[in-house]
Structures are given as C-alpha cells and as structure tokens.
Image (cartoon, helix red, strand yellow):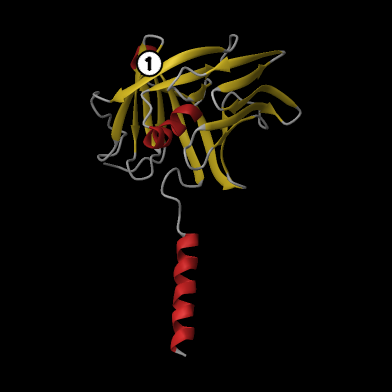
Amino acid sequence: MAALAIGIVTFLQISACAQAPTTILPNGIYTYAIIERGQQVSTSTLVVNRAHGELSVDEHAAPMEPSETAVRVLDPSTFQLRSYVAGVPAHQVAAVTVSGATARVRYGTSTIRVSAVPGAPFVLADVFVGLWFQLPAMLRVTKAQRLTSITLGFAAPHQALLTVSPGTSRKPQRASKDDIAITVTAEGASSTLWYDPKTFVMDEFDTPGAEIVFARTATPAP
C-alpha cells in the first residue's frame, strides 16, 4: 500500500508539472493598439500556440483582409525565427525560411537569399507587431546585441542590422511598474520596448521619431 501511495503521488506530481503553464510567451491571445501621432488607427491580435515542437505566432492586423495573417514559426526553446508566411490561404505574399545563417526570402514574384551577419541571428520585420512581440524572449536566450533583420514592407525586401541595448527612456504610463526596457536601433532610428520580466510579453513599443506606439490593450495597471 505504501508503495502504491508513493506511486500515485509521483504520478500526480509529474502530471502537475506537465500541465504547468509555460512562463515565457505563454500560449494565448494578445491584442495591441497601433497608435500614430497620439491617435489609435488600428489593432493587432497575436495568437501564440505550441504544437509539434514548434511555437507559432499568428498575427492579424488592420488593414489586413479578414482571412489574411502573418505567421511566424519560432524555435520554442530559443524563440529564434524558423519561418514566416504572410497572405491569405490561397495566395502567399511573402514566405521566409531560415536554415542556420542563411534565409530564403520569397516576396511577390522575386526570391533572394540573405546571409546573417556573424553573431547576429535573424529576425523578420514587417509593418506589424510580431517582431517586437517575439524579441524580449529571444534576447533572453540568445543574449544577442546585434540582429540581422529581414525587412519586408511596401518596398523590396532588404537586410538591415539592428542593435539592442538596455533602455534608458522614461517609463510610459501604459507600462507596468515592473516592466523592463530595451532600446532597439535600426538604420539610425531608435525605439524603446517595454516588457514584463516574468512572461517576457511586450507591453509597449515606442518609436518617437515616427510617432508610432504599439500598446498592449490588457497591460496591468502599475
């Protein structure tokens, strides 16, 4: 009987551990207001899900079509980019696959290959929130201070170098009192990202030069 009791307790302990929620970028739905010059112009909703050894971040933002999404597939242990697809189910506007220090980028009708800067892992920047949402968790693991950005927007895809450093900006009112800041500099412009140090979920991303803010709509009050 004692052995049976010990076995049951052990089984329950293992089951509890298996069912414990993931701390870093927990599965769930996250919504951000996209603010330009002090006015909210749209929203972005991201769905985080883990399955089959991968972590996906599925983003839908205005002015996307109802069925259009941008899906990032990340390594669930390092949060580094494995692939990216944007468009509607019947038509992909962009597709990126990463293999080591090389990325294959298909954008519209053109395909290019991009090599990462040594010591600067790949990230993908589009016009939405996904990169900045992913970034704190990725930096926690990789400790990278430079990133090779595959940048997709309204022009042809291109490569850019991002640098990251501790944030020094004054904390905005929408950020939680415990939030930590990092500064991201790309092509001469600096932005500040505020994130929850427990979950590494982004609460706010500010780009003062462009007067653009991505603010989580469910950020806890300070």
In the figure, 68 relative to 93: above or below?
below
Q: Which residue is mark 1?
A: 211
The residue under the point 48% across, 40% down is 30
Q: Residues within 10 Å of mark 1 (few under 14, many from 20)?
A: few
Residue sitting at the far bottom: 1
Drawn side of residue 47 relative to residue 192, left or right: right
Residue 54: x, y in percent?
58, 42
Residue 87: x, y in percent?
67, 26
The residue under the point 69% across, 15% down is 108
In the figure, 145 relative to 47: above or below?
above
In the figure, 30 relative to 210: above or below?
below
Drawn side of residue 88 relative to residue 134, left or right: right
Drawn side of residue 171 relative to residue 202, left or right: left
Q: Name which residue type carries label 1.
A: Glu
Q: Quadrant of residue 182?
A: top left
Residue 139: x, y in percent?
39, 32
Circle 1 SS class: loop
Residue 193: x, y in percent?
35, 28
Quadrant in the picture for the C terminus: top left
Q: Depth check: give the residue in front, 164 or 174.
A: 164
The residue under the point 58% across, 21% down is 102
Q: Quadrant of residue 147?
A: top left
Q: Depth check: give the residue in front, 36 or 169.
A: 169
